[in-house]
Amino acid sequence: MDVLNLKLQDFSGMSFDCDCGMKHSLEIEQIVYGQEITQDIIQAAHQYSAGGKILTVCDQHTYKAFGKNVQEAFVNAGLDSSVYLFTSMHNLLPDNRQIGKLLIEIPNDISLMVAVGSGVINDITRLVSYKMKIPYMVVCTAPSMDGYASATSSLIIDSTKNTITGHLPKAILADENVLHKAPGHMIKAGFGDVIGKLTALVDWDLGVIVLHEQKCPVIVSMVNQAVEKCIKNAQGVRNNDKQVVANVFEALTIAGVTMGLNKNTRPASGAEHHLAHYWDLKAIEQNKEHALHGESVGIGTVVICRLYELAKKVLPQGIQCPSPGYITELLQKAGAMVSPTQIGVTRQDFEDSLVHGHTIATKYTILTHLNKHYPDLLKEYASKITGEFYNS
């Protein structure tokens, strides 16, 4: 199968034997991206609810963006649908409280959940539908992160961020006009998440060399091709160019697809994500609003590239990482953030994230490698990078 020339919708339900030795498969049955997709949403909801009751899950913002339209379309089509609306007008957190509220208030006879939103709404709906053993589908409202095609949710449990097992959506549906109207900072965050794949793949190389992990060249090529399309048009992110927004969504969705095909997050997540999650946790502990995931990932990518640059002499041969200057330039072209100071990370939390970021997950990254083999150097590099970002 020539997966590098497939259109986005062709990835749904795909299965193929790969030269890497794995049989890759994806259990998402539909991926729809286009204009005026309301009828596609209705048909998918009818199919996956099997005529039963539907619960559409939104927050205040996503309800206005598209949730109201989706619910009205369901009702007009004769589908038995109701809306669960999170009331928070500010930064909705995927935490115990919100998950518990939905679990308590959801009717017992729901046959399908429809998440209308992006990261948080999708993560919460995925988990609750999984626990209730019912299918869900997601109607996207912003190209802000790569979790639409994921089987896991990033959730805050007792003030700790955890990756919790769930299941894949039956369908991913996105209207390009809705995505184009998403707030600019969310589109820039999506670009930051796309750029993070560059260091994620380098960390995967490190895992291959040190731990002899398996790495699929086809999956790597899928990620690189999607990222390259965004890089070539970085300026268009700043200008909210419609085709570039489509490219960002495509890259994020393909990144999610590759995680499904590889059965882990290796193709799309590395040390840059560990830093982002560490900063989120510190913000939560301090009762502060944290940045969008993709904003933190983009900044984390700059930081990890700098760490690779400093640690080059003590790393195995064959490791090639982009320069931090190159990543900074890409993010600036897109109008995205490039420094932890821009998202409120304190100096101490930033330095600590480099020293202790390896504790966020078991995945082998440069943070893991330096902590295991060169802990004193890691502290030295952390201090140096901190001084560079915090002007001292």
Image: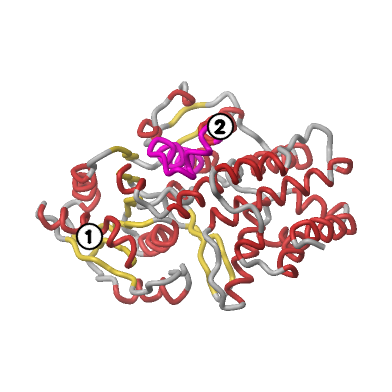
Asked whether 319 falls inside the magenta stretch, the response is no
Q: Which mark is residue 68?
A: 1
Q: Main secondary structure of the magenta part?
A: helix
Magenta span: 231-257
Residue 4, can we see it? yes
Name the residue type under label 2.
Glu
Q: Secondary structure at mark 1?
A: helix
Front residue of this view, candidates 79 and 15: 79
User: What's under tag 1, amino acid-wise?
Assistant: Lys
How has the structure been colored for display?
secondary structure
- How crowded pointer 1 is (Cα within 10 Å; few <14, some 14-19, many 20+) is rated as some
Q: Is residue 203 left or right of residue 263?
A: right
Is residue 257 visible in this depiction of the protein?
no
User: Residue at (32%, 51%) from the top-left corner?
Assistant: 139
Q: Position of residue 165 (x, y in %)?
A: 49, 58
Measured as percent of width and height from the top left, residue 302 is found at: 68, 48
Find residue 133 and report its image quarter: bottom left
Quadrant of the frame with the C terminus: bottom right
Q: Which residue is mark 2?
A: 228
Residue nearer the viewer, 34 or 129: 34
For disc 2, the neighbor class at 10 Å (few under 14, some 14 to 19, many from 20) is some
Residue 242 located within the stretch drawn in magenta: yes
